[in-house]
Amino acid sequence: MQRDRESDIGLIRVSRYRPAPQPPPHPPTPMTRVIPAFRLPRCPSERCPVFQRPGRIKRLYRALAVLALTVAVSAPGTVAFGDSVHHPGPPLRPWVKSCLRHRGPAGLVNCLSFFAKHDRPKALQPRLAIDELATPTADSAPVGITAGPDGALWFTENAADAVGRVTTTGTFTEFSVPTSGAGPAEITVGPDGALWFTESSTDKIGRITTGGSVTEYALPTSGAYPWGITVGPDGALWFAEPGAGNVGRITTGGSVTEYAVPTSGAYPVSITAGPDGALWFTELLSGSIGRITTGGSVTEYAVPSLDSLPVGITTGPDGALWFTDAGAAQIGKVTTAGNFTGYDLTDSVFPFPWGITTGPDGALWFTENAGNDIGRITTSGTISELSIPTSGSNPLEITTGSDDNLWFTENSASQIGRVTP
């Protein structure tokens, strides 16, 4: 997989306390000339997907810049979603949809590498240590990560077609996935003691033992782009099929069932087991959180924030579902009854939060893909953010290790990061 790594693009976050005005039909040229943050990198056109080629994306970013500059930036805080106005045409959604047309969520990850490569001023940050470990394979593009049953961290290498293992002392092992171009994405521990992962580019679910033996199961639907995966309360593995608009279920014996999400084009991405015996998932393009019972009954809850693009989701220690909202630049919370609360991130440039997990300290920890930060939010909504040492690392997923540290993947830097709380 080719990845273009250098960029100094930034977006200015749109206020969510008033309806966002539409960009003028003919943006004034002087306004676009004086914004240094919107200088675009030049990538060889033969290596860029069509939506990444400089001419087209430059016009899009300039339009977004004009839109952002016409709206006052509000102070961070809690949003009472019930009083907010849901904006019908969020500025990031067309761009996100364009990115998803190329290899699904992996295409979006590739697009986001254009955001990250520029330094930005940060507020005073907590004194936490971050260590970074390079994967043995260069340009491996790690995506998913989970704590394994053997005490090590297991992760996927999307560009290397491999599953990696790293001990808490930093020793790596890599295992090749049999199918070439599989694009392994998310990974979780199964009820059978093996690791289960999605193969986003070849429409398969993979299983790997702690000894490195891999089995693959083909999905019935072509172009499903399977991404998020988790263990359900019924002892099966549940996964999201964003390309097909389905939620899938696979038994440890390999039997697959697929359930359609009611909203067409919803693009389910991440999934987690809820505290109520159901599975909860994010709908990236419909701006909703979905709930599916083990019998396949689906309920959808629209996120009331402006410009919502929910990505990651996890069950919090308070019994609510917590999710990252890349479009609204928030961390969101939804109860099992469907009541929402949102918390603004403090990064002044669009952070694009992605993965989220419960930490050993009872707080939620998350990644900011474009912001190049690791964030922490308490269940009462207090947020702190910590810069990742490697600029433009594009962090994706995050998990708690057996050592009670937070471990995360750095997609563009091809590193595994560790935060010591």
Image (cartoon, rainbow, N blue to C red):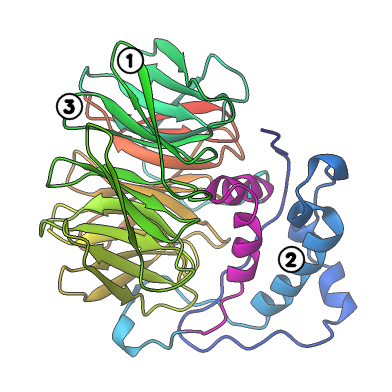
- Residue 144 on image: x %, y %: 41, 36
Write down the region rendered in magenta: 87-114
Res. 292 image quadrant? bottom left
Q: Residue at x 57, y 85 (%)?
A: 20
Res. 296 image quadrant? bottom left
**Is tag 3's residue or tag 2's residue first in the polypeptide sequence?**
2
Name the amino acid, label 2. Tyr
**Is tag 2's residue or tag 1's residue first in the polypeptide sequence?**
2
Taking the magenta stretch, the answer to whether it contains residue 106 is yes
Name the amino acid, label 1. Thr
**Residue bearing mark 2:** 61
Mark 3 surroundings: few (<14), some (14-19) or many (≥20) residues within 10 A: few
Name the amino acid, label 3. Asp
Q: Nearer the viewer, mark 1 or mark 3?
A: 3
**Residue bearing mark 3:** 192
Q: Is residue 171 above or below residue 267?
A: above
Disc 2, SS: helix
